[in-house]
């Protein structure tokens, strides 16, 4: 076996194993999908009818800070049910949801969750483009 053959084998081995390592674990997919559904429903209810803004007006800076603190405490509580922290969710969710096949497989096995997931607003859940906060 010459040097180039070994280099190619090492390169291909590394390339193939990196694909396996980057695949989302089923337990992570379950946790993150369930968390995203609950977060999306919570955020939808929080801003339903513009109640958080009051009469359709933009909230004051003080009110925005209160809302931010309230939302973060609600997010923390939802994520705690799934053994996740806010920082952990924000850092790892992009990687977990990048494995579209695993997410679709999990949702395919749970039609009730798929229905709730599909009902989430696309632009705010990181599923409809680059807009939104990507919860």
Image (cartoon, rainbow, N blue to C red):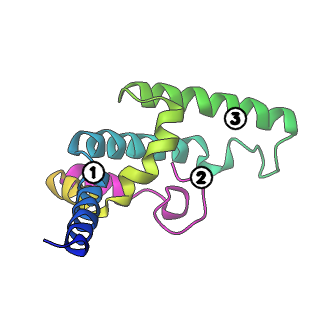
Whether 125 is among the magenta residues is yes
Viewer-nearest residue: 102 or 77: 102
**Label 1, label 3: how far apart the Cα atoms are:** 35 Å
Mark 2 and mark 1 lie on one chain; the one further toward the N terminus is 1
| Label 2, label 1: how far apart the Cα atoms are | 27 Å
Query: Which residue corresponds to mark 1?
Result: 21
| SS label for mark 2 | loop
Mark number, residue 133: 2
Which picture quadrant has residue 38?
Answer: top left
Q: Return the residue at label 3.
A: 68
Does 64 sit above or below residue 130?
above
Q: Quadrant of residue 19?
A: bottom left
At a point 32% along the width and 53% down the height, the residue shown is 22
Relative side of 75 to 36, left or right = right
Q: In this view, does 96 lie to the left or right of 44?
A: left
Q: Residue at x 39, y 46 (%)?
A: 37
x and y percent of residue 23 in the render? 27, 54
């Amino acid at each position: 076996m010459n040097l180039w053959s070994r280099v190619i084998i090492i390169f291909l081995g590394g390339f193939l194993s990196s694909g396996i390592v980057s695949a989302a674990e089923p337990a992570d997919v379950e946790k993150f999908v369930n968390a995203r559904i609950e977060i999306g429903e919570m955020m939808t209810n929080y801003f339903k009818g513009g109640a958080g803004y009051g009469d359709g007006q933009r909230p004051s800076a003080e009110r925005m800070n209160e809302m931010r603190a309230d939302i973060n405490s609600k997010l923390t509580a939802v994520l705690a049910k799934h053994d996740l922290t806010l920082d952990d969710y924000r850092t790892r969710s992009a990687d977990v949801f990048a494995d579209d096949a695993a997410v679709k497989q999990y949702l395919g096995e749970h039609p009730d969750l798929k229905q709730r997931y599909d009902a989430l607003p696309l632009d705010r859940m990181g599923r409809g483009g680059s807009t939104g906060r990507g919860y």
